[in-house]
Image (cartoon, rainbow, N blue to C red):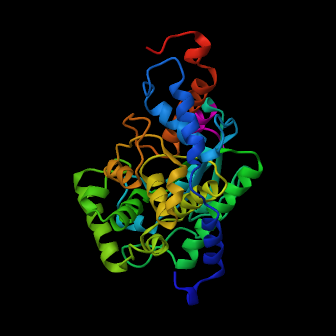
Amino acid sequence: MDEHKETNGERALKETIRRIRPMDDEAARLARSHSDSLTKPPGSLGKLEDAAAKLAGITGELWPDLSKRAVIVMAGDHGVCEEGVSAFPQAVTPQMVHNFLNGGAAVNVLARQAGAEVVCVDIGVASELSHERLISRKAVWGTRNMAKEPAMTREEAVSAVLTGIEVAQEQLQRGVRVFATGEMGIGNTTASAAIVSVLAGLPVRETAGRGTGIDDKALSHKINVVERAIALNKPDPEDPIDVLAKVGGAEIAGLAGVILGAASNRCPVVIDGYISSAAALIAMRLCEHAREYMLASHLSQERGHALLLQKLGLSPLLQLDMRLGEGTGAVLAFHLLDASIRLMQEMATFDSAGVSKS
C-alpha cells in the first residue's frame, strides 16, 4: 500500500492488523504437557490433541469456553457469471439467502446440531433483500465481470474487508468466542480460483474445479475465463487487496475481514472449504500471524483445495467428500473442537487414576 495514496479505509485495516499478535506459545505448551499426562500414549489422540493445544495458544486459556459460537455466512454475487461459469443461475444467490434466513439450508441444520448461530450478511448481492434477521452491509451490488474489467475498485474491496471486521466485532460484543466461515455466491469458485492462482502461483488448471457441478466442456471454459481475467487485470501477487479488487468477490473479502477481526481479539476461526480458504489466504497475506488463529475443518472435493491448505500450512480435521460451502464443514468441526476440550477437562491423568506410565 503506497503511503501517499493510503485511504482512511486502508488505515483502519492496518490498525486491525497491528492488533493481531502471535499465538501464546506457553499456553499451547502447557496444553501439550497436560495432554501428555492423560491416561493414553502421548499423541495417540492425533489431531484432537493438536486442536486442544492450538485453542489454548489462541485464547491463552488451557480449556477455553467456546460454547457461544457463530457461523458467518457472507453472500455476494459475481459479474463473471455472465460468462457461463456456473451450473446455476445468479438468481440462486438471493433465493439461498432467504433459505438461510428461514432456517432451511444445510448449514442451518448442522448449526442447530452444533449449537451455533447462523449469521447471514448481504455484503454484495445484486438485488434488494430485506429480512429481520439479515445483516445488510452491501459493499457492492454484485461485482463486475472480471473477464472484462476489475471485479471491484480498491475502495470497494477494502470496504468489504472492513465490513467483515465490523461483523466479527459485533458478534464478539454479543459473546461469540469462536467463528466459522461460510459463504453464498453463484460464481464464487471462479473468483476463488483466480485468487489462489495469483497468490499461490499455481496454474489455473490446478485451481479451477467443477464448483456447482459443471461438465468437462464447461470446466475447460471456466479455466479459460479465469486465465483471461488474470491476463486482463494483471493483479499484483504482492498486494492481496489488489488481487481481491481485480479478481475477487465481496463475500470473500468479507470473510477475510471476519478472520482478521477474530484474530485481533484472540478468537479461533474454523475455515470451511475452498472459497473460505481463499479468504483465509487473503487474510494470511495481509497478516502472517492471522494464520495462527485458523483451524481447517475439512478437505473439500473442489480441485485445488488440498494445494491451498498446504499454502496455508493447515491440516484439515475431516475428509467427507463435501463441496457445498455455506460453512457446513466448519460447523461440523465444532463437534471435534468440543471433543478436544472435553478430553482435556475430563480425562484422568496417570497420577489421578493410579495408572502406571510404563
Q: Is residue 287 left or right of residue 150?
A: right
Work out which residue is located at the far bottom of the displayed protein and give it.
Answer: 4
Position of residue 234 measured from the top left corner of the image (x, y, whole percent): 35, 79
User: Relative to residue 160, is residue 242 drawn left or right?
Assistant: left
Q: Is residue 103 above or below residue 1?
A: above
The one nearer the camera, 89 or 150, is 150
Residue at 45%, 53% (x, y): give it.
Answer: 277
Residue 45, x across and y down, in percent: 45, 26
Instruction: Give the left or right position of residue 227, taking residue 140 as reference.
Output: left
Q: Closest to the observer: 205 or 57?
A: 57
Tell me the quarter of the picture where residue 190 sits. bottom left
Name the residue rendered at 45%, 74% in the picture: 239
Residue 287 in the image: x percent, y percent? 52, 64
User: Depth check: 273 or 221 in front?
Assistant: 273
**How many numbered discs sit on the rendered protein?**
0
Image check: 134 left or right of 53?
Answer: right
Q: Residue at x 50, y 27 (%)?
A: 36
Q: Where residue 333 appears, x then y in whole percent?
A: 52, 36
Q: Eyeballing the image, is 291 above or below 18?
A: above
For the record, the magenta segment spans 102-112
Q: Is residue 158 magenta?
A: no
Which secondary structure dominates the residues rendered in magenta? helix
